[in-house]
Amino acid sequence: MKNINKLTLLLAVPFLFACEGTGGDNTGNADDFAMFIEVNKTEIEADGKDAATFVIKDAKGNILSTETNLGYVSFKNVETEERLDRYETDFTSIDNGTFEFVGSYRGVETTNTVTVTAKNRSKYEKYHRNILFCKLTGTWCTYCPNMTAGLAGLPASVKDHLVILACHCQDNFSLPFGQADLGSYLQSLFGASGIPAGVYDLSVMDMAQKTADINAILKERRINNPSTCGVRISSVKMDGNDMKITASVKAAAGGSYDMACALVGGEYSYMGGTAVDNKYHDVVRSVSGNFLRYNTDSAKTLAADEEMTREFTISFETAPTAAELDNLHVVVFAHKLVDGESQVDNVAKCAYGETIDYILND
């Protein structure tokens, strides 16, 4: 028995040494295996360019988020659960606010979080900026629901800066325009090879369908094309068979603007189309004559903080019912020439019977 006990003890000794050796200086405490997120600065300018850079470190201070390890790393906004792009460690913002982030390495989150405050958006853009997104679509289009899903997947903070006009091509919702319809005309004008396609601010066309790709384009436009004016819709009411819309544009620092208008339906049902729920939203029902382009005849040059007001009239063959009016929204936007090319500078949207005032950035 004594020999057996000695043998058992001898076999156990190396095992004990091996356990101690794998931990090095660690005590086996869970904290020794914890990871931490750090940031190089906690305040940035809300210009979309100034960046805060995140890193992930282990308990010994070793950096885990090295270039070779970035495929295993991600950084997430705690409130929205939106993640930075893959392989991205820099956070920028085009909105004021305080944002809390957590990091993860190989699927394990950091034990702490960090906050970054973005400030001074009004320094770069006085008025809340909305982007006009003309979605070229059709009830018969097989891939159009992909773009609809991509738009629906955008974060709420992005949707807050987006006005969608669904311009249908060759279907029951098409709006006659020229010798075809508005959607087909835009497709030809901007050289889209098919649909779905998106025309941003009546200036740039892209056929992106995925949420991340659409989001990247919207962000780029807000960074590089900040609004220079605000748009207000002060009255929307019926006068017989005519809808009267009163709207204004106010310049931030001066410039020349033209105003245009569109009427859209909030939701329509259509059986037999490609929409998974048979619902179609933001369908364009009417547009003003200068919808597509800045018109020098109706444009006006404004000084800083100067305002121009215009009334639009949309006529119906028969007066809409109360239910039909409840489904309608008015969109008013400002055209501006940028490097000789027309683009939408800002846009506002409101339901029938409602109004919307200028929205200033903090």
Image (cartoon, rainbow, N blue to C red):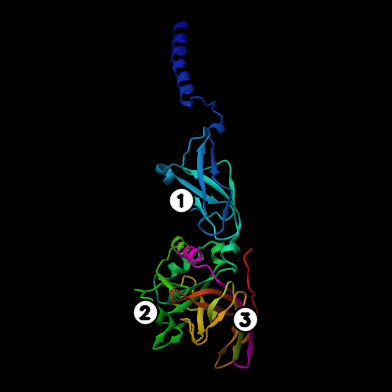
Task: Tell me the residue that label 2 is attached to.
Answer: 188
Q: Secondary structure at mark 1?
A: loop
Horizontal side of residue 240 vs 276, given as left or right: right
The answer to whether 58 is drawn above or below residue 102 in the figure is above
The crowd level at tag 3 (other Cα within 10 Å; few <14, some 14-19, many 20+) is many
Q: What's the distance in space between the residues labelled 2 and 3, CA to CA?
A: 32 Å
Q: Which residues are magenta?
A: 217-241
Name the residue at 47% across, 23% down: 19
Task: Tell me the residue that label 3 is attached to.
Answer: 352
The spot of residue 14 in percent (x, y) is: 44, 17
Q: What's the distance in space between the residues labelled 2 and 1, CA to CA?
A: 37 Å
The answer to whether 38 is drawn above or below residue 239 in the figure is above
The crowd level at tag 1 (other Cα within 10 Å; few <14, some 14-19, many 20+) is some
Q: Secondary structure at mark 3?
A: loop
Q: Amino acid at mark 2?
A: Ser
Name the residue at 57% across, 53% down: 44
Q: On the rendered image, what quadrant is the C terminus found in? A: bottom right
The answer to whether 187 is drawn above or below residue 128 in the figure is below
Instruction: Tell me the mark number nearer the camera, choosing from 1 and 3.
Output: 1
Q: Earlier in the sequence, mark 2 or mark 3?
A: 2
The spot of residue 347 in percent (x, y) is: 55, 75
Q: What's the distance in space between the residues labelled 1 and 3, CA to CA?
A: 43 Å
Q: Amino acid at mark 3?
A: Tyr
Name the residue at 57% across, 62% down: 157
Q: Earlier in the sequence, mark 2 or mark 1?
A: 1
Residue farthest to the top? 2
Instruction: Tell me the mark number nearer the camera, choosing from 2 and 3.
Output: 2
Q: Amino acid at mark 1?
A: Glu
In the rendering, which numbered label is found on residue 115?
none
Task: Tell me the residue that label 1 is attached to.
Answer: 88
Q: Secondary structure at mark 2?
A: helix
The spot of residue 274 in percent (x, y) is: 43, 73
